[in-house]
């Protein structure tokens, strides 16, 4: 089962929602407050977790990092209220997307009405 690491910008209510769907979630606020983005990515890699964040910079880190086991779920909704995020993520997780465990290494961007998945394998196929 996929495990998650919630970035510092993710409220505890979001982590709790993801836990309600049966996932293991740790929060950067609890484990390493003040960690820079690349440190969060490294923490996720070391613990085989997917990062949950609002921060688009993680998309860049995902594309350019040699740490291939780390996936990122970026939340792209406006306004970024807890209530709105809970509503959107609840709908997303109800789709049972993560039954495909290979997504733990993907970049997933969740919007209000749709989501996009970018798999690392396709990204690294430069030969």
Image (cartoon, grey):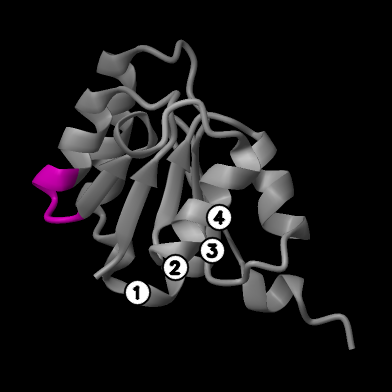
Query: How far apart are the alpha carbons under marks 1 and 4?
Result: 23 Å
Residue at point 53%, 63% (across, down)? 70
Q: Position of residue 73 (x, y in %)?
A: 47, 47
Magenta: main secondary structure:
loop
Q: Is residue 109 left or right of residue 12?
A: right
Residue 31 drawn in magenta: no
Query: How far apart are the alpha carbons under marks 4 and 2?
Result: 18 Å
Residue at the disc numbered 3 = 106
Q: Which circle's residue, 3 or 1, is located before the other in the chain?
A: 1
Quadrant the C terminus occupies: bottom right
Name, please, the residue furthest toward the bottom: 127
Q: Which circle's residue, 4 or 2, is located before the other in the chain?
A: 4
Q: Nearer the viewer, mark 1 or mark 4?
A: 4
Residue at the disc numbered 2 = 103
Q: Is residue 24 above or below residue 123?
A: above
Local crowd at mark 2 within 10 Å, few (<14), some, or many (≥20)? many
**Secondary structure of the residue carrying numbered label 4:** helix
Query: How far apart are the alpha carbons under marks 1 and 2?
Result: 6 Å
Residues tagged 1 and 2 counted as in contact (Cβ below 8 A): yes
Residue at point 73%, 57% (across, down)? 63
Q: Nearer the viewer, mark 4 or mark 2?
A: 4
Q: Position of residue 57 (x, y in %)?
A: 68, 36
Residue at the disc numbered 1 = 100
The residue lying toward the viewer, choosing from 125 and 62, is: 62
**Secondary structure of the residue carrying numbered label 2:** helix
**Residue 83: numbered disc:** none
Residue at the disc numbered 4 = 42
- Give the magenta-colored segment's residue range: 19-23
């Amino acid at each position: 089962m996929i495990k998650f690491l919630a970035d510092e910008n993710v409220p505890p209510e979001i982590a709790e929602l993801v836990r309600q769907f049966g996932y293991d979630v740790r929060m950067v606020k609890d484990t390493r407050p003040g960690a820079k983005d690349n440190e969060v990515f490294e923490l996720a890699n070391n613990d085989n977790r997917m990062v949950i964040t609002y921060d688009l910079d993680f998309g860049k880190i995902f594309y350019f990092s040699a740490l291939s086991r780390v996936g990122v779920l970026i939340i792209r909704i406006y306004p970024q209220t807890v209530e709105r995020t809970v509503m959107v993520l609840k709908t997303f997780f109800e789709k049972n997307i993560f039954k495909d465990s290979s997504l733990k290494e993907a970049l997933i961007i969740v919007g209000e009405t749709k989501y996009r998945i970018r798999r690392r394998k396709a990204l690294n196929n430069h030969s």
